[in-house]
Image (spheres, helix red, strand yellow):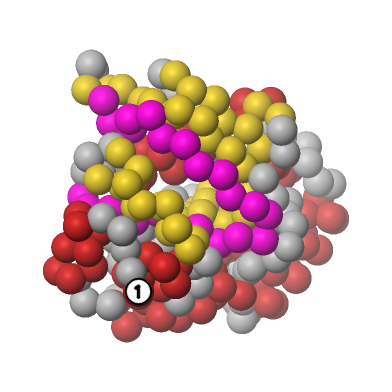
């Protein structure tokens, strides 16, 4: 279980996340929703340990998040951030080799298995600039999965893609669901959240105002702000 207790984050004296608490069980896909500037990406960056918190506590399986190994958290960034000078295969195996998490034969074997799963085995020797946006997204996901992290985070997974690919990416994220994995994604795209997500965390101005199952949130949100948010956006 991932648990956040009274989590707050400030930037230059401005409160970005305000006293947020929630817990999520393994096997869950959770979407962090909210308008622009609500704190979605900041929350995800705190969970990925790219940002420190000012107060509160985050634990995973009763251990402080800061004590987890580098292989415990996989992150798929908004802009993919593939190394342009490396082939697809090299992109996948770079981190586990540098961090000595896998031997080179292990890393190559697992990388090729993932590329096969994502229909990209023929792209192993190509460079990122030879791939489509959807292919880059799948490579970025494969790179995050190569050491099988129990926590997998997505920051705006569809923002850099053609709108027609939103459902495809949502289905791909849904296919990654596993009893021993927790998936969280920050997104402003309701279609990307509604298909795969079991649980919704809805933020507004840094405050967690909805913490509910996906069914409850989309059918009967409790707050007027969430009702307005859903009304203003097409699902």
Q: Where is residue 164? Give x, y as percent.
A: 32, 83
Image quadrant where one finds the C terminus: bottom left
Q: Which residue occupies the foreground of this view, 47 or 125?
A: 47
Q: Which residue occupies the foreground of this view, 48 or 137?
A: 48
Q: Is residue 13 magenta?
A: no
Q: Where is residue 234? Give x, y as percent.
A: 21, 77
Q: Which residue occupies the foreground of this view, 158 or 59?
A: 59
At a point 84% along the width and 46% down the height, the residue shown is 103
Q: Where is residue 12? Give x, y as percent.
A: 23, 17
Mark 1 element type: helix
Residue 158 visible in the displayed image: no
At a point 58% along the width and 38% down the height, the residue shown is 3
At a point 84% along the width and 55% down the height, the residue shown is 106
Q: Which residues are magenta?
A: 15-36
| Residue 41 as seen in the image, left or right of residue 233 | right
- Graded by Cα atoms within 10 Å as few (under 14), some (14 to 19) or many (20 or more), the crowding at tag 1 reads few
| Residue 181 as seen in the image, left or right of residue 226 | right
Q: Where is residue 202? Give x, y as percent.
A: 34, 52
Which residue is disc 1 drawn over? 219
The image quarter containing residue 212 is bottom left
Image quadrant where one finds the N terminus: top right
């Amino acid at each position: 279980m991932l648990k956040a207790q009274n989590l707050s984050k400030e930037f230059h004296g401005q409160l970005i996340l305000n006293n947020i608490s929630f817990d999520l069980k393994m096997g869950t896909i959770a979407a962090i929703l909210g308008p622009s500037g609500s704190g979605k990406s900041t929350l995800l960056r705190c969970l990925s340990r790219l940002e420190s918190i000012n107060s509160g506590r985050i634990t995973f399986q009763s251990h402080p998040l800061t004590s987890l190994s580098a292989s415990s958290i996989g992150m798929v960034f908004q802009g993919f951030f593939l190394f342009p000078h490396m082939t697809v295969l090299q992109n996948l195996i770079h981190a586990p080799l540098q961090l000595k998490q896998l031997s080179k034969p292990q890393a190559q074997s697992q990388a090729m298995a993932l590329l096969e799963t994502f229909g990209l085995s023929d792209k192993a020797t190509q460079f990122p600039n030879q791939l489509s946006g959807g292919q880059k997204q799948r490579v970025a996901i494969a790179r995050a999965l190569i050491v099988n992290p129990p926590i997998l985070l997505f920051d705006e997974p569809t923002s850099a893609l053609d709108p027609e690919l939103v459902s495809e990416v949502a289905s791909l994220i849904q296919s990654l669901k596993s009893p021993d994995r927790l998936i969280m994604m920050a997104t402003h795209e309701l279609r990307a959240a509604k298909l795969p997500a079991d649980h919704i965390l809805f933020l507004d101005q840094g405050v967690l105002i909805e913490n509910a199952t996906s069914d409850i949130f989309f059918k009967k949100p409790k707050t007027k702000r969430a009702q307005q948010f859903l009304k203003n956006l097409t699902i």
